[in-house]
Image (spheres, coloured by chain):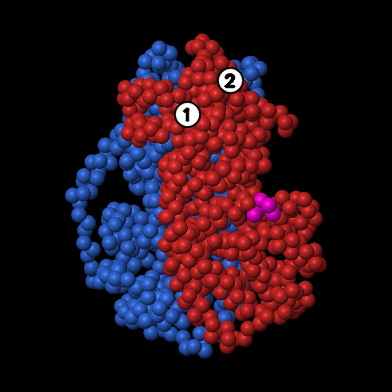
Chain colours: A blue, B red
Amino acid sequence: MFEIAELGHTISKPDYNAQISELRTELLLIQQQLKSCDFPVIILISGVDGGGKGEVINLLNEWLDPRYMRTVAFDTPSDEEKERPKFWRFWRTLPPKGSIGIYVGSWYSDPLSQRVYGKTDNNIIQVELMEIRQLEQELIDDGALIIKCWLHLKKDEQKKRLKALEKNPETRWQVTDRDKKHLKLYDAFLSVAEKVLTETSTGDAPWLVVEGADIRYSSLTVAQHILSRIQQHINKRKTTKAIKANDTTRKIVHLNQQNLLDSLDLSLKLDKKNYSRQLSLYQGKLNKLSRQAHNKKRSSILVFEGWDAGGKGGAIRRLTHAVDARGYQIIPIAAPTDEEQQQHYLWRFWRHIPRAGLLTIYDRSWYGRVLVERVEGFATEKQWMQAYSEIVNFEEAMTAHGIMVLKFWLHIDKDEQLARFKAREQISYKKHKITEEDYRNREKWDDYQLAVNEMVTRTSTQNAPWILVEGNDKKYARVKVLKIFCERLEKMLDEKK
Amino acid sequence: MFEIAELGHTISKPDYNAQISELRTELLLIQQQLKSCDFPVIILISGVDGGGKGEVINLLNEWLDPRYMRTVAFDTPSDEEKERPKFWRFWRTLPPKGSIGIYVGSWYSDPLSQRVYGKTDNNIIQVELMEIRQLEQELIDDGALIIKCWLHLKKDEQKKRLKALEKNPETRWQVTDRDKKHLKLYDAFLSVAEKVLTETSTGDAPWLVVEGADIRYSSLTVAQHILSRIQQHINKRKTTKAIKANDTTRKIVHLNQQNLLDSLDLSLKLDKKNYSRQLSLYQGKLNKLSRQAHNKKRSSILVFEGWDAGGKGGAIRRLTHAVDARGYQIIPIAAPTDEEQQQHYLWRFWRHIPRAGLLTIYDRSWYGRVLVERVEGFATEKQWMQAYSEIVNFEEAMTAHGIMVLKFWLHIDKDEQLARFKAREQISYKKHKITEEDYRNREKWDDYQLAVNEMVTRTSTQNAPWILVEGNDKKYARVKVLKIFCERLEKMLDEKK
């Protein structure tokens, strides 16, 4: 795959100068257009040592307007990064919509070098490449433009370059032992690179292989490629939007199907005496278990979803009551901030992933995508349909990192909800919780019910299961949540003993 | 100072229950009010071991609406935190306006424990306490409410508590060697604590010392204190606003004073030949120096301010051209995002402080406070007046951490600016840079000139100097910026050899 990039492409200085000024103008103009677009541009610059990555990136930095771009470089992960799933460091640096992020080193760096150094085998890199394809696909599905450039250099060119650098006393210090070592690994490196490039060149995110021997040629080629990809993408998005505008959201069809929620026994209850006995029993247990988890640096993520007035808040408070305040964080999900709005919809959840040993409770969550956004038509059918697998991937990233994920659906029936609304309206400090919207939402009960049903079916996995909680009796629900969390924690801590 | 907190305060369960429900209602109501207020509430819960910090915080978490509060706990600093000035970790976690942040462990923890363990002496802690007072004062000046609670426990009570925990096999594991060690250090701890508390109890941020032996008493006392402080503060802010509304901004008075900017020789220039020779000389130098700085983990922060069309962008590009793209970040300062608007005005600059070894370039900066915000009346006179010392403190935090800070003012005269505006309007990709606002700003030239003059006078320090750059000739200006940056870098690297 590197043959064409070994033909000795060069461009003369006059030719270069003749083209460069127009190119720079166009780059700045396209950035101006991009500003008002609703997608980010992610540019990966990779390649062999000495392939001129640094020079190309420097030139791009010079040519582009720094107000709407940034360069992201990765070193060895910090401990804050190590304590989270491996893609966390990339998510936290994604460029906002309307801007460009240039990645020096990316999700490709580690899989590539670890394979070359023999720290992983073919099976492992296969899985890693699949994860990368998934990541890129999710970003693309959200509208992102991903441009991947590979700067190639023939082996003898690489050797020549290092020699030249070493010869000159002014530049000798630039040649490190690592560079020499890499030269020896050139062949191994190239064969892994070929595998990586071929397997991750997709229709939407193809690799461009560029010969890196002549910086004028390579920088011009890369810049022109970027320019034309952005132009194309802007046009494509315009067309897609026009199509979407004509495509009215399909009405949700209610098939006469079995419903998971209907199968719950909402008559389950606990009397006061049993409740307080079990409450303190499990709170005591949880206190102990959560301290152990903290010491062992095991994190948990709990998700609470449920009907309005379903008792999420009360259940969460009974649970946190037993946990040291230093050990947990409640993330109440409200409307996204404007920084969040400029990102992929999962970004605002990624940013709160806990460091090692902590408990994070999401009060409402990423499931908004397949619940309220689906029912209210804020997300298109395509969007919420693909959200199922995006969410499963997201949670898999957590569980693969050793984080426990549990999701609670607090279920009540329609009558119980109405009774609770009415009761809340009587309590001075709860009045504000009930708005007209709550009543409006009741009218869509059946739509929500269908969405919940589908959500549970599609996203309840062994590692990140949905727990349906019979919630008409608050006491029963609270104890069930506590009990299940304890059991799961215990199991997790046992496994790793 | 702890006498009153050793009297054995308790509250009976019936009394507690009688008060608690009203208190909780009021806490929720005040949070509702707080939501629309333009200040954050910062609550520090400190005290002796066994004083019940954890229990009090757990109860506050239970009583308060989690949507508008968060608990922030600190462990040993992560490496990302260690590579920045020590207060960075606190800045990054400050609660947004309208919400409450509860701090478990705070800027007091390290100074206190390090003094107790004999790792610092009285002089050092004196300086640390001064820095803390400054930090709190800045937050308060920005409107923040700081509530500081100290949970006290008599020595024999502390001993009793640990014994009780140890006796019960269920709780024995909670008593660590560290706890026992701390018990031995009780007297030393208390004497340091007394010093810390007395010296940092200011009129705006006094310490409340609470007896911690009875959790009902202490939690009720702390919660009531929080409630009344917030109520007071809301009322106070209302009054202050009413006064401010009547207080029209003073017109800037132009005294017939010497002007630093007028003293610059704007005829300084470089011919083309000398320019390209010196440009590549210093770019080469900078390349080498910046790599050394990177290897030695020495960071630099460069600030660029100047007249519109003063040549900031061009100077920055010539400079970054010489630096590895992985080693720098340009932060163009535009309007704050909404997350940034909910914070102290310095917060959005704190968040971009580089990790070790990197160069961060601010294209416009925190000096907006004393330039555009002053001239346009966006900041009150009090605000921009106190900004000078806040900025000096901010930069001192950087330099004290070993980060080099250099500030460039790119100066041109009024005629040159007009000529550049006209020239830009002729270039297709620069046209968008010139707006009517630029012309409007020219009308306030004298006001800006005065503001710049005062800014330089008040904020140019030895460790973070202002460099005034004669900018009518772009070539001269670019080389001067490069040359001075090189010289300073060289000096810094030499010093530490």
**Vertical comparison of B48 with B419: above or below:** below
Q: Residue furthest top?
A: B273
Image spot of residue A209 (x, y percent): 42, 28
Instruction: Return the residue at label 2.
Output: B282
**Vertical comparison of B51 with B394: above or below:** below
Q: Earlier in the sequence, mark 1 or mark 2?
A: 2
Q: Secondary structure at mark 2?
A: helix
Q: Is residue B39 left or right of residue A307?
A: right
Residue at 35% across / 59% down in the picture?
A369
Residue at 57% across / 61% down in the picture?
B146
Q: Which mark is residue B312?
A: 1
Image spot of residue A148 (x, y percent): 42, 35
A154 and B430: which one is in front? B430
Q: Spatial distance from mark 1 to mark 2, Cα to Cα? A: 18 Å
- Asked if the stretch drawn in magenta spans residue B286, the answer is no
Residue numbers of the magenta segment: B129-133
Let me know if residue B327 appears in the view: no
Residue at 66% across / 73% down in the picture?
B210
- Residue density around tag 1, few if under 14, some if 14–19, many if 20 or more, within 10 Å: many
